[in-house]
Image (cartoon, rainbow, N blue to C red):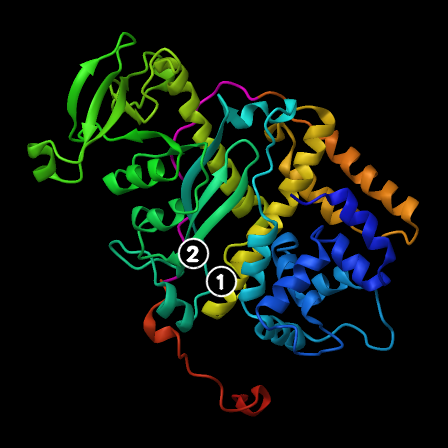
Amino acid sequence: MIDLAKETAALARWPESERTAALKRILPRAAVKGALRSCGCDRFACPRMPGWLAVWLVIGLGLFARDCYRQIYRRLRPWDKRRGTPPRSTLCEARKRIGVGPLVALARAVIKPLAEPGRSWARDCFYQGMRLMALDGFVVNLPDTKANVRCFGRPGGPSPGAFPQARVLALCEAGTHVMWQWLLKPISWGEPSMCLALLKKLQAGCLVLWDRNFRRYELVVAVLARGAHLLARARMDLPLRRLRWLPDRSYLAKIYRNAADRDADRNGITIRVIDYLLNDPARQNPAKPKEKHRLITTLLDHKQHPAKTLIELYHVRWEQELAIDEIKTHQLARLTLRSQTPAGVVQELWGLLLAHFVVRHLMCEAAARADVPPVRVSFTATLEILRVRLATCPKTHARQSQWWEDVVDEVSREILEPRRDRTNPRVVRVKVKKWPRKRKKHYDYPQPTKKFRACIVIQR
């Protein structure tokens, strides 16, 4: 676990430019250099864009997503009259030089679950000692280039999507919104096919929450093999073999790999099934007012884990939906990523998720100070405070430590009111464009062969 106050205090001994860059990312400089060294990217000497600065530049693309390359560079380093601000091409070449490896190594070194058992501010991050982890995915739009289309593809349907897309599947610590582990694949990959590799990184003592899209037998086996438990939504047509009813109206059943195993009662896994419906008209689907819902869980003791408690607990899974909204709506705040090549897309996504961890880490420190759950701290306010307050760090240790205390204190005052009990319709409103859809013929559009002035023909 990173001690941000300790890291910040150590930065006062560094040269001013390096200290500024480090403060703006709140990541240990030793970890950045170690990531570069492990990938062999520390062998290239570039006085204007050293490797550590290039790594922070990529993370800056996620933290200051609305700014251009040169503006992000200005946020990282003070103005130098002799050298000035490098051109965009220099910054892009620095990104290419370090590649994806250092970002991956850095994420593995610093990103950890932040909730600590026994801490009052983390009480909503656990259920009976089990860390709540949610599993879900999202897609991001990419620039419409041939390379991105070839590597990542477009979403299918009656007509190809407007942009190529990449799919991200992540394990999220539900109580802190920290994206702990993730996989990045082309849009053609389905989330269930990506899930098995991600579950191999699961820690023992977790309670995993996921939606009914993940219904494969192998996934339940993988969760149990890691010493974790499962609470998931399931389809009502899931083939089950009922064993016995429990006093709270849930029941024990077995799931199998395939129909042959089910007929032979071979290699079955005992689970607990909870079927329920909602009798509040405001919470029902208007198209299906009597719709039934089904949860399955590996928590078999109905006395220790009552059915209604688990039904309420399952809705913690929506915390990951809010974390995804933080990344796509507030942090990214762009229609697409900015990278034109597949390697750049992967690098930019790793930087985006690292930047999200930086914001969430600061929010957890502020939540501990205010003694409230981390989800009660405003993400948008914290993000704006970081963007505004990350100025040049004072040179003295005392002033620098006070600067950090002031930032945490400011964030700790951005506390949200308790959430209202409400529902919203799952609908979208899309503006219809008058322009035709972009087709394959438009990629190699003819370019001018003459200067504009030479094309002018004045008519009599």
Say which amino acid is labelled 2. Leu
Label 2: state its secondary structure.
strand
Please say whether residue 431 is one of the residues in the magenta stretch: yes
Residue 32 % position (x, y): 66, 60
Please say whether residue 186 is one of the residues in the magenta stretch: no
Q: Earlier in the sequence, mark 2 or mark 1?
A: 2
Kindly identify the residue that appears in the image at 33 percent across and 72 percent down.
440
How far apart are the two marked residues, 2 and 1, measured between alpha carbons? Answer: 8 Å
Q: Quadrant of the N terminus?
A: top right
Q: Which residues are magenta?
A: 419-436
Residue 342 % position (x, y): 45, 68
Pointers 2 and 1 in contact (CB under 8 A)? yes
Q: Residues within 10 Å of mark 1 (few under 14, many from 20)?
A: some
Label 1: state its secondary structure.
helix
Depth order, front residue of 6/182? 6
Residue 184: numbered disc? 2
Kindly identify the residue that appears in the image at 41 percent across and 39 percent down.
135
Kindly identify the residue that appears in the image at 63 percent across and 37 percent down.
379
Vertical order, 2 against 18 (above or below) = above
Residue 410 % position (x, y): 78, 35
- Residue 88 picture quarter: bottom right
Residue 49: numbered disc? none
Say which amino acid is labelled 1. Val
Depth order, front residue of 169/269? 269
Question: Which secondary structure type mostly characterizes the magenta part of the structure?
Answer: loop
Depth order, front residue of 159/23? 23
Residue that badge 1 annotates: 346
Residue 168 % position (x, y): 43, 51
Vertical order, 315 against 34 (above or below) = above
Vertical order, 369 against 135 (above or below) = above
